[in-house]
Amino acid sequence: MPNALLIAELSLREAARKRLVTVLLLLSAAFLGFFLYGVYRLDLTLDERAAAAGLDGRSLTGASNLPVMYSAMFGMYLVYFLGSLMSVLSTVGAVSGDIENGVMQSVLARPVRRAELVLGRWLGFAAVNVLYVALLSAGLLGGVYLLTGYLPPATVPAVALLLLTVALLTALTVLGSTLFTTLANGIGVFVLYGVGFTGGILTAIGGLADTPILGTLGRVANIVMPTNALWLGASYHLQPQVARDLGEVTRGANPFFGTTPADPALVVWAAVLAALAVAGAMWRLSRRDL
């Protein structure tokens, strides 16, 4: 275990040395500034319209504030997407890249077991990715609150589900890095990510068209790759009651936002799948010929 923590520390230093952290901070600051400026202008426009209609103000949780509510939720969807992208791209060569460039042989010449190396790689990259999503979520939600006074009703469980998504994607990418080349691994994980998104679309269409088979296919896809289901569960916590009521009226036709909380069994499965992926990666590298 100490060796795994050492490898995790080295992974963090590697991310800093490659200026990954610097690039993330700069681009994330640009994204937040661009997005929050749009929210600011939107809020001003809504206030002007309310004043022109002779209203004293707008209810933060009423229908008149739906544009701001949906802006916050779409902003968090972008956080989910960027976090997923970061999880895959930062980890895609965690093991395969070292094997391809010959670094792995020199590392394993030291008293470090292969399983400890894989565990340390996952811990290091998962720490970077989780911290990134946590800070980006706090910046976006805090910015929306400071500009508009609106804060989604249950941000903590929503962000927790996003962090679980990031940990799962990082684990699956590390597993793929022990099985495939760097390029094949990246393509494979993105295909799995697409499977999860397809599950959300099928479930939405099945509910709207009252077609149970599509709902069943969507649930199967969510079991195979539960990332999108975790996002839908997170989006449920980000919606006030008026937005949830609107989603129920439309029978969940919007595939980007959920109308029900995440199934606890699915959340547990996502955590178990992440643990299985890391364990599988440790087992695979321990028996792989380099």
Image: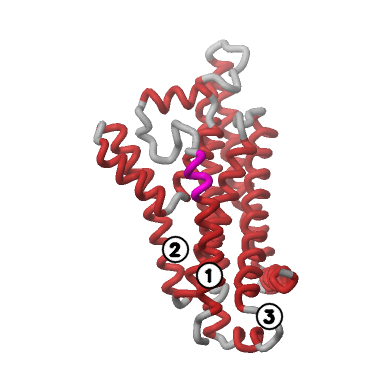
**Residue 204 screen position, x and y as percent:** 34, 38
Decide: few, some or many residues near mark 3? Use Cα within 10 Å; few <14, some 14-19, many ≥20: some
Image location (x, y in percent) of residue 140: 63, 42
Label 3 vs 2, first from the N-terminus: 3
Near-viewer residue (241 or 40): 241
Residue 286 left/right relative to 226: right
Give, as a three-letter code, the residue at label 3.
Answer: Val
Per the model, the C-alpha gap separating discs 3 and 2 is 28 Å
Q: Which residue is mark 2?
A: 189
Q: Specify whether 239 is left or right of 184.
A: right
Q: Which residue is pictured at 24% across the width and 35% down the height? A: 211
Q: Which mark is residue 112?
A: 3
Marks 3/2 in contact by CB < 8 Å: the verdict is: no
* Residue 281 circle label: 1
* Amino acid bearing label 2: Val
Question: Label 1 sits on what residue type?
Answer: Ala
- Depth check: 91 or 148 in front? 91
Q: Residues within 10 Å of mark 1 (few under 14, many from 20)?
A: many
The quadrant of the picture occupied by the N terminus is bottom right
Of the numbered discs 1 and 2, the one sitting upstream in the chain is: 2
Front residue (pair 52, 156): 156
Of circles 1 and 2, the one toward us is: 1
> What range of the chain is rendered magenta?
264-269
Q: Earlier in the sequence, mark 3 or mark 1?
A: 3
Image height check: is 137 above or below 247? below
